[in-house]
Image (spheres, grey):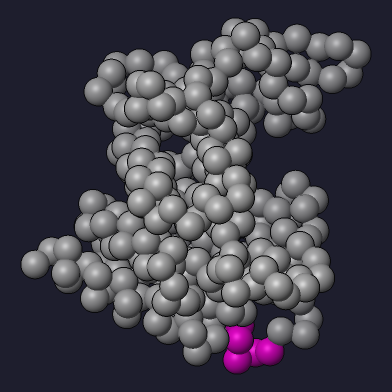
Amino acid sequence: MHLAAARSANNAEREFVNLGMVRDHLEARRELSVSVPRPMRSFHIGKTLYNLETVANGVQFSRRVRERGYFDNLAAVQCDFGQAVEASLELTEALASLAALPSIAPNFYEPLLDEATSAGLRSQIEELRYFAGASRDDRPSCVQHGDFSVENIFLDEQSGRLEIIDWTDAANGFPPLYDIFLLFCSSGYLHPSRESKNIPNDEEFWAASFEDLFLSDHSVSKIVGNLLSGACKRVKISPDLLRPLLVEFLIIRMNFCRLKRSVSLERACRRQLELLLGPNGESVGMSAAARYNTVCS
């Protein structure tokens, strides 16, 4: 039995309702390699609402990736993240028919740009984004967990199953692969060459991590590219769309960060978007397309 962390009443209610719907929906899919905790009950202590749910089985993924030297073991990185990517794809497919989940707020598709952002950059975002020119009823979107971070994933080494917690942000309307992008972004990976450098704040840390994960040619970045290429094949999306999908991911993620008043993370997303729109960002779809063609040949 697990007492979920205290949070605002609206968020706690949403998480409890979403968790119940998702668990009921997945009960008929025993073949899946992923599961969720069982909600038990909610109760108030004063003005604070608490959720009671079963304990997640396994080791929290964040504990594993934060271990010193974890990313040096490329075979483990490939296996662990490959398993998490597979779980995300299974969930997306299984939850596609769960119509009862809410949709993302319409304003979450609006880029959060400051006044200093140039007209050229604004135009580039609108031209490149995955939902460019799409109306609200015309977006090719899907149901996602919404916060598929390493903190919310538990790996059960004995059963080989994954358990996913915190369903507050689960919704319809996400672009494809949103959860997978968030999985990688939450890992906090930095290339060893940065270890001797002083990273002044969280904003610069997450920007550097994004660059090392998606915009470099190091070994871990290649694993990320291979897993994204395989995911594209599974959902029948051209890897050329990875860059537009990443743009859309960052736009929506910025809005979630503002909703949760995570100022530093919102700024980090804006920095990541600037990097993605720069010259190095052009290689995202191109390199993945090469890997995709290799996989398909």
Q: Is residue 203 visible?
A: yes
| Residue depicted at x 40% and y 43% | 80
94 vs 182: above or below = above
Instruction: Residue 30: say if magenta.
Output: no
Could you say which quadrant of the image residue 135 lies in?
Answer: bottom left
| Residue depicted at x 17% and y 63% | 295
Quadrant location of the N terminus in the rendered image: top right
| Residue depicted at x 35% and y 27% | 160
Q: In this image, 175 relative to 251: left or right?
A: left
280 vs 237: above or below = below
Instruction: Residue 119: say if magenta.
Output: yes
| Residue depicted at x 42% and y 77% | 217
Q: Taken as a whole, is the magenta stretch helix, strand or loop?
A: helix
Q: Pick the residue in front: 137 or 178.
A: 178
Residue 132 in the image: state x and y as whole percent: 44, 72
Q: Which residues are magenta?
A: 118-122
Residue 138 in the image: state x and y as whole percent: 38, 58
